[in-house]
Amino acid sequence: MKPRRLNRVAPRFSRRRFLTAASGAAVAAGLLGPVDPSRAAAPHVLPALPYPDNALEPIISARTISFHYGKHHRAYLDNLNKLIAGTKLSGLPLEKLICETAGRPEQAAVFNNAAQVWNHTFYWRSLRPGGGALLARFRQRIEASFGSVEACKKQLAEAAITQFGSGWAWLVSAGDTLRVVKTGNAENPMTQGLKPLLTIDVWEHAYYLDYQNRRADYVQAVIEKLLDWQFAAENLWRT
Ligand code: FE
């Protein structure tokens, strides 16, 4: 897999432009291929929210969740299904689809929508009403990598606050150590061979209804009150 630079600002396409790109250049690249009506792979589905839409209040309002999950997340899913319907990509699991299309400009539309579907599902799981327990064994891993839990949280906050424009802050596993990285737009660290453990969405749609331009307030509240460290530990030790 071609190494890719994190935090790269991917091109943003209008719907018409990315449909054109997907059906033109991508067909030429042989990945989307000619539409075959006999291919009827099941479309990707929107996973249910792991909690009621008001469960993260007062940190994240039900109104924000209703737009973020009900409109934005669903739109990425609907776009993805339309883009890959009847193509060779339609039968691939989501993670494989992301890695297959990463770094291919002609596949930017498919990659962006597929990664945003995955990133949002992972974001909802990264949050838990009241936060998730920090298990002793996982605390030790954090302390070994960052020195302290507070230092880890500080790096996460700094990454989330300083990400220029839309993107994500991540706690990831990189071999034997844990790291904090940030990515732009739809980018995902898994395309760099890193294992995502937790993420914070810093697209404006994640916080603007509740915090307007105060991204730092949203980030600090999420880190202190909602991050599910138990989910992170499960991801670290998941094979
Ligand atoms: Fe989002």
Image (tube, helix red, strand yellow):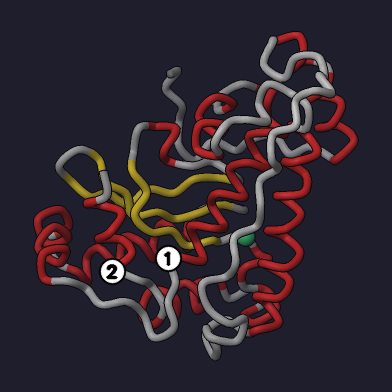
Residue 65, how many percent across, how many down?
Answer: 65, 75
Q: In this view, does 179 lie above or below 72?
A: above
Viewer-nearest residue: 197 or 144:
197
Residue 126, which numbered label?
A: 1
Q: Is residue 234 above or below residue 130?
A: above
Query: Quick check: which quadrant has ligand 1?
Result: bottom right
Instruction: Choose top left, top right, bottom left or bottom right for residue 16.
Output: top right
Name the residue located 32 percent from the left edge and 76 percent from the top edge: 132
Residue 41, how many percent across, how many down?
Answer: 69, 34
Q: Distance between the residues labelled 2 and 1?
A: 9 Å
- Left or right of 84 on screen, residue 186: left
Q: Is residue 193 above or below residue 205?
A: above
Q: Which amino acid does label 2 sit on?
A: Gln
Name the residue located 9 percent from the left edge and 56 percent from the top edge: 144
**In the picture, which quadrant includes the C terminus?**
top left
Residue 168, how many percent across, how many down?
Answer: 50, 54
Count of labels shown? 2
- Left or right of 1 on screen, residue 144: left
Under 8 Å from ligand 1: the CB of mark 2?
A: no
Residue 230, which numbered label?
A: 2
Residue at the front extreme of this rendering: 38
Viewer-nearest residue: 89 or 120:
89
